[in-house]
Amino acid sequence: MTPATKANIRNFLVFSSVFSLSAFGAEQDFSNVQVTATPVAGKVQMLQGSGGNIAVSIGADGVLMVDDEFGPLADKIKATIGSLGGDAPTFLLNTHWHGDHTGSNEFFADKATIIAQENIRLRLADPGAARVPEALPVITFVDGLSIHFNGEEIRLTHLPDGHTDGDTAVWFTGSNVLHMGDQYVNRAFPFVDLSSGGSVVGLVQSIEALAAQLPDDIRIIPGHGALSTKAEFVSWIAGVKETAELVMTKMAAGKSLQDIISEGLPAEYESWGRGFINEAAWITAIYNSTSR
C-alpha cells in the first residue's frame, strides 16, 4: 500500500468519526458563501450554500424546510427564504443527523417544529454530538410520516441502514419532488457512515426499492450535487451497485483491501472519485461494511 493510499484510508476513517459534530465547519470561513435558490417544481425550491442541499416549500400555510446546512449560514438561509417571499419555517425536517445538514437546527428551532426519524434524535442527543437541546427533533417517527402542508402531502420515508441508520427521503407528492438526503450524491461516490449504522448493502437495497416507486418525471434533490432526474438517479444506483459487487467479488476471491485498492475500479468511475469520497475511500467503505 502506498503512503498516499494509507493517507486516504486514514483520512476517511477519521472523518467518519467526526463528520457529524456540531462544531464541524466551525473553523471554516463562510463569509463569502452565497446561498442561492433554484426553482424545482410546484412550490419547492432548492437552496444551496455550503453543505447539504436544502428544500423549501413556500405557500399559503407558510414555509417547510428540509435540512439546514451549517450553523454559520443560518442568517443567509433565512435571508434567501425571505427573498422568495417566505417567513420563518413552520416545520424543519432532518434527512439525517450530520452537521452539514442539521447545523442550523438551533437557529430555526425558535419558530420551527423539528421532525425526524427517531435514530436522528438519538444521535443528535448523544453527548458526543455536542448539540444543545434546542437542536433536537421534537416529533419523531419510526418508518414514515405524512405532513399535509401547502396543499400537498409531504411523505417522509425511513431508508434504514444506508448512509446512516436514520436516513429519510422526503417526497413532495403534489409538486413531484423528492429530497433524498445523503442516500444520493449526484455523480459521486456515496459516503457510508459505518460508525452511524450505515451499510453499503443497506444503501443499495433502500435506494433500489425507492426508485421502483418513483414516477419517471419526478425531480430529485440529492444530498449534494446538482438537481437530478429519475434516469440519472437510476444510473447512479447501477454504478454504486456495480462497484460494490466488484469489490465484494474480489473479497470473496481472497484479495486483501490493499490489493483491491491497487487494482482500482473501472475507468468510467474515475470522475466519481473527484468528489468528497475518493476511490480508495469508497473501496474501503465497501470492504469494511462487508467484513462487518
Image: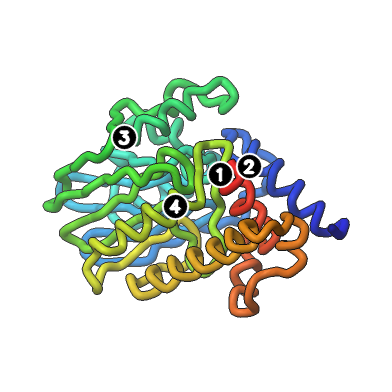
Residue 195 in the image, given as x and y percentages of width and height: 58, 37
Asked whether the beta carbons under mark 2 and mark 3 sit within 8 Å of each other, the answer is no
Disc 1 designates what residue? 193
Say the numbered circle drawn on residue 203: 4
Disc 3 designates what residue? 115
Marked residue nearer the N-terminal end (2 or 3)? 2
Which residue is most to the bottom? 268
**Secondary structure type for disc 3:** strand
Q: Residues within 10 Å of mark 1 (few under 14, many from 20)?
A: many
Marked residue nearer the N-terminal end (4 or 3)? 3
Q: Horizontal placement of 11 versus 43: left or right? A: right
User: Residue at 48% across / 47% down in the picture?
Assistant: 163
Q: Nearer the viewer, residue 22 or 127?
A: 127
Amino acid bearing label 4: Leu
Asked whether the beta carbons under mark 2 and mark 1 sit within 8 Å of each other, the answer is yes
Nearer the camera: disc 1 or disc 3: 1
Amino acid bearing label 2: Ser
Marked residue nearer the N-terminal end (1 or 3)? 3
Q: CA distance from mark 4 to mark 1?
A: 11 Å
**Secondary structure type for disc 1:** loop
Asked whether the beta carbons under mark 4 and mark 3 sit within 8 Å of each other, the answer is no
Residue 51 in the image, given as x and y percentages of width and height: 53, 51
Nearer the camera: disc 2 or disc 4: 4
Question: How many numbered circles are shown?
Answer: 4
Q: Is residue 75 visible?
A: no
Q: Horizontal placement of 133 versus 41: left or right? A: right
Q: CA distance from mark 4 to mark 3?
A: 22 Å
Marked residue nearer the N-terminal end (2 or 1)? 2
Q: CA distance from mark 2 to mark 1?
A: 6 Å
Disc 2 designates what residue? 16
Q: CA distance from mark 2 to mark 3?
A: 24 Å
